[in-house]
Amino acid sequence: MRKEHPVTPHILVIDDEEPVRVVLRQMLEKEGYEVEEAQDGAVGMNLLHDHLYDLIITDLFMPEKEGIETMREMRKYFPQVKIIAMSGGGRTGTPDFLPMAESFGAQRTLAKPFERKELLEAVRAVLAQ
Amino acid sequence: MVPVEARSRFIRDREGKPIGILAIHRDITARKRAEEALKQQKDLYEALLKAQSDLGEGLLITDGQCIRFANDAADQISGYSAAELIALPSFFELVVPEQRDALIERFRQRLSGQDVPDHYQTAVLHKSGQRIAVEIAVKLLRAGDTTGLIITARDITERQRAEGALKESEQRYRSLFENANDAIISVSLDGTITAVNRGLEVATGWSRKELVGQHYDKLATPRTAALERERTRRALAGEKLLSVFEAEMKRKDGGVVPVEGKARFIRDREGKPIGYQTIFRDITERKRAEEALRESEERYRSVITALEEGIVLHRADGTIQACNASAERILGVSAESIKGQTSFDRQKYTIREDGSPFPAEEHPAMVTLRTGKPCSNVVRGVYKPDGELGWISINSQPLFRDGTTTPYAVVASFADITGRKLTEEALQKSEQRYRVISELVSNYAYAARIEPDGHYTVEWATESFTHVTGLTFNEEAYRPDQWKTFLYPEDLPIAHRRLRKLLAGQADVSEFRILTKSGEVRWVREYGKPVWDEAQGRVVRLYIAGHDITDRKQAEEEKQKLQEQLFQAQKMEALGTLAGGVAHDFNNILSAIMGFTELATDEVPESTVARRNLEEVLKACRRAKTLVKQILTFSRPHQQTLEPIRLQPIIEEVLTFPRASLPETIEVRRHIDKTAGPVAISPTQLQQVLTNLCANATQALRERSGVLEVSLQQIEVEDVLARTQNNLKPGPYIQLTVSDTGCGMTSAVQERIFEPFFTTRPVGEGNGLGLAIVHGIVTGYGGGITVESTPGKGTTFHVYLPVSENDVAPENILPYSPSPARGDSGDEKGAPSDTTHFGY
């Protein structure tokens, strides 16, 4: 059964780095958002099936399932889902996929490391759409 | 009638007064008759005498000493007239004083009947005082009781003179005869020696006594004796023989003396030969000399015969007197056939080197005959009788007799150079071929002669020499240091080494740069071959063949550059890969650090130390973020498609801000061409490029005042520039120039200036990435960047970016206000929004 959260936005954070997840959670929770974590795209997808999130913040380059992949899948099944893509640059030095992320459905992109301000502003903006 | 002689005288008185005449008459009839007879006789004599006086003899008839008659000749001899002679008291007056007394005595003696000479010589004292030698004949004359003389006189002055001359001559002759060194012998027709002189005695060792009266066989060798007999016979037969002949004389001691004899007949009064006289000269020495000459001549003859060179002897009139065997061989004629000919006869067979006819008067032998001066190495073509053409090189020498200036003969010597000429011609043809070929290729060649004083003179050079170097060779001699002006200064050591090697006699191949006449620098590769002269012990000539290898060198340089660029790119890529790989994790870590720190600051009150410290941590994190971003930026090989933007506004904006941070001592100038075309580039990145460059300039100007100049213009990149500068494709580019008059940099620094992490700044100031980023951005957009710098003067960067074919999108024409971009901060405040705005 899909739950909706009418008042407090629920945000899903997908990143394979735990510290990053923790930081994001703390920052977002302080703002009053509800945060769920997933360590990779697959887990994220699963979660998505159960819940409807207001926003997904996902890293682009992860093992198991790349962020782009994840996004595509998400879009496929959940066209209305809002996504913020973030990246610290490709592992293999390949070009930054942030621009591409947009064409794959991310509303905004965030380049790591970003400051809290940036994060919060982006979240606010996307949620407002 | 009776003839009487009457004598009468006056009779005088005592006073003397004549008083009468006494006359005495004598009967003189008989006397008269005698007188008549006498007169008749006298007349007769006179007539006779007159007739005789025509014979030239002077005739005097005297009565005692008085002259009664003198003929005309007597007048002439004495100088007195007949009247004067008769008037003389005595004819002895006519005799020269010193002989008078003697003659007077003789006269008395004659009168007294003594026997005295009737004929004798004496001298007459001419009326003028001159003495006339006379020959006298005296005859006593008695007529009645008178005694007189008939004297005939003949003027013998001439005769005496002649006699004297004759005597003198005889004396001389005798003396000559006696004293001649030559041997003189007089021989009668039958061969008997009639006289010999002292010379003969000396020559033969015989004495006069032993020879005179002997037959000349005593003196002659059998051969000579036979010769003599023959000669005598023929001469007597009337043959005209040479008066000079050679013979041999036999000495008393048995030795034989070679002599030359000169004989003439001795003739009697009728002219008939009665003997002959021969003068002999000892010719031993002469014979010896002749022999030596003959030998010498033999030697010369054999030398001349043996000479390879042809020798032709011309007389003064040009005719050929003789020639040797080699001349015959070379000319293809026999000596006989050309003897007596002149160069004019032979002219039609001769030609000059260029094939035109060779006039005889210019033949060296003729020239030498005319001028008296020798000629040398005159080349002439000669057609042999068989039609073949040969070539000879002629020398001609005049021969002079002592004291003359016109030659009496000319010796022409010549060598057959046909072979050499053919070789020369073949060589010339071959050389022509090579020359043509060498002109066709870009190779050049030249030969330089090295003078003893070290000067260099180019003897010849192919045309391509001029093509390559721009120099036309002249025959000036250059000092060694003058050659330097043609060489690229940096390559002088190579040139020196090369020259040393060449001058030591070794061939050398070297590559080096030269400066052409127009100042262009070209690479050449030259092969040098020295010619060593044994005699002088040094290299006298250099043969150089070279070719212009500028293209090859340039290609090599390009290749090297490309390789470097490739290497650089590979390095960059590797770096990028590395950086990229690191960046991801690094960013994650940074995210954690920054994030947690930010969260932590919430817990810590402001104005506490802890809070401040946390702020510092955040600052540091931001810098770390920038650093990583920069690393990622320049290692990014691709750019996505962008819309073209005009650069001018961005530049303006960028320039506004640095101005504020620059010291007043720095002047900022700008030359922005408004018509420069658009470039498809991200504005942010353009900003970054310009900002970094300006930061660099600012740093360079930091210590001093100066000028920072920024200019923008559109240029067309030509092929050459494109190739050699950063691999730009030909086409329109904008050239963004940032230059400063700062401290500049050395070429070593220039080479590394775009290297990541390369910096000349002290540690802590700057990270050495600024220009690397610029380089990365610019090349990423298909552009290029160059740097020029002179230490102490300044630095100029040129950034080239391809002009976009497309027009600028309308919305991009609006002026744009970027967030302040500082130095190497690359601050991203507001950048995301901007990037989205511009489709990034």
Image (cartoon, helix red, strand yellow):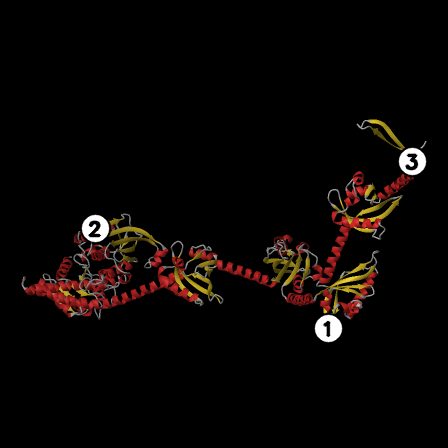
| Left or right relative to B266: residue A38 | left
Say what amino acid the circle numbered 3 marks.
Ile
Q: Which residue is mark 1?
A: B253
Say what amino acid the circle numbered 1 marks.
Asp
SS at circle 1: loop
SS at circle 2: strand
| Left or right relative to B403: residue B14 | right
Quadrant position of the N terminus of chain B in the picture: top right
SS at circle 3: loop
Q: Which residue is mark 2?
A: B667
- Mark earlier in primary sequence (3, 2): 3
- Mark earlier in primary sequence (2, 1): 1
| Left or right relative to B730: residue B613 | left
Number of dots carrying numbers: 3
Classify B23 as above or below B581. Answer: above
A123 or B722: nearer the viewer: B722
Of tags 3 and 2, which is closer to the observer?
3
- Kindly report the distance in space between the C-alpha atoms of the residues bearing marks 2 and 1: 135 Å
